[in-house]
Image: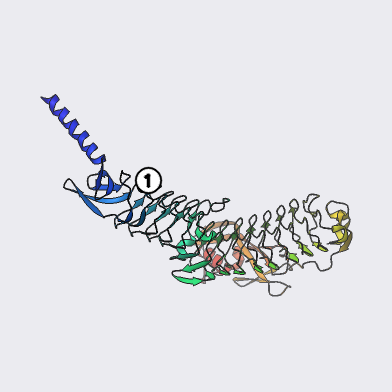
Amino acid sequence: MKMKGRCFLLFALLFSFVARAENVEVNGICYHLISDGIAEVTTGSTQCSGAVEIPATFTYQSVVYQVEGIGNNAFKNCSALTSIVIPEGLKTIGTYAFAGCKALTSVVFPDSLTRILAYAFSDCTSLKKVQISNHVETLGAYAFSGCSAMESVTLGSGLVEISSGAFQNCTSLADVDILDLASYCRMKITGAAEVGSCSNPFKYATTLRINGVKTTELVIPDGVIEISDCVFFGCNAIESLVVPNSVERIGKCSFFECKNLLSIALSEKLQLIGEHAFDGCVVLNGLSIPDNVVSIDNYAFNRCYALDTVAFGKNLESIGNLSFCNCSSISAIELPNKVKTIGNQCFYGCSQLATVSLPASITTIGNFAFRDDPSLSNVYCYATMLPTAPENVFMNSGVAKATLHVQESVLELYQATTPWSSFGKFEVVIDEMPQCATPTIALHGQKLSFTCVTDRVEFVSKVSFVNSDEEHVGNEVLLTGRVRVNVFARKEGYRDSEEAVEEFDLPKLGDANGDGQITIADVTTLVNIILGKQ
């Protein structure tokens, strides 16, 4: 009897599972019954045609089912399907769900939708307008690829990822509307830099709208910290760009081949300009690199043919490979006094480049860095330690007719060392960048002061304990010890000064907090005074 009961229970469970997993057709639409009360649209023998509205719920065998998804291949190649209305409550559209629906002209997405998977609407060649609802987070790979009649797309505020080829071969796409620009700047876009892969829709678009308003001036919202990789890749609608002071990083390929971008105003807090960030911005005609930028990545301004002037920030240390390659309108380059490295082919093909100024800090110059720069006539190198540089640095740049300006103390060394020995004329540099005078440290009562013969300098200081000891006498603590003060001076257009160092005995500073005793509390007061906190 027990055995029969167990067999009956097992049969009931199996039957229940099979019942939940079956496919059914209701009112001409096929559904896959996932579990009690949950279903998704699936493929079936009936080819849907004309206008189709998927219900939010349906009843089958007295059970009400919520439609939460459109399964893989559900309407694939339904060539007579002209429009589809997707109900509220539906969350996912599966791979190839509407692929090849060549008569489909419109689709309405619900607010509940969160994912549109790979190839979902690929080759829907009559689809003209798409509005991605605000809760869609992901567009899968090639989701709308081959939608050759698509004229406009609206990107909802919840979108966080657009995958490879999402809008590939959408050749009629002219209008892109971004509903939330700050969110879009944080977008993860995969595969956009791959040849032939159009992840974002800007490959073809000529009109950019921000929340419905047409614009050619892109003003990044304040509060954005990073402009993500590839987000405006190929956006030819942008003519000017304003980056607020909150932005610290411009990502890889962010503005790659924005071919109508004329001017950019960069964030004062910007620290990094990524690879290919402005590569191919062919009409960009002026550039000022902010002082906080330490590194310019490879290809950052490659092929900016109209770029005629570049002002480099004073804290720049390295310039990557091909960063300014083929910038054929630049006539002069003056690098600030912290630049140590110039990458391979950095200024290759700068055909109008006539004057180059290399700072005393320069240590390494890469292969072909100044190759094919036939206008080069004067190179100023302030380094007293010869930079590491291969023989090909100035290849095809006619330096046999150019002049190298160096310091008198190393003139003979440059004349005897390649590639510098290739220059036709040598001159002793006259206008060497001056150096700030070494500051003087003075103690006035309980406060430190710094002075410098060079006027209007900025002092950079550090105060630290050398050692400290305590001697307890009754209810008093006698302090013995020393503090060290390090300071140097800096000024734009000058090299940093030598560092000045002074040490002071703590007891000599007296009763710092004014309580009539020299105790441990005076240490805290003293340090706060020196650091300007008190």
Who's the residue at 47% across and 58% down the image? 187
Q: Which residue is mark 1?
A: 73
Residue 118, percent across and down?
43, 48
**In-image side of 400 versus 235 (left or right):** right
State the residue in front, 219 or 445: 219
Q: Secondary structure at mark 1?
A: loop
Count of marks overlaid on the render: 1
Q: Quadrant of residue 370?
A: bottom right
In-front residue for pair 438/86: 86
Image quadrant assignment for residue 111? bottom left
Query: Image check: 529 left or right of 85?
Result: right
* Three-letter residue code for mark 1: Asn
**Residue 188: x %, y % from top left:** 48, 55
- The answer to whether one can see residue 23 in this image is yes
Q: Nearer the viewer, residue 450 or 382?
A: 382
Q: In the rendered image of this protein, does residue 56 appear above or below residue 31?
A: below
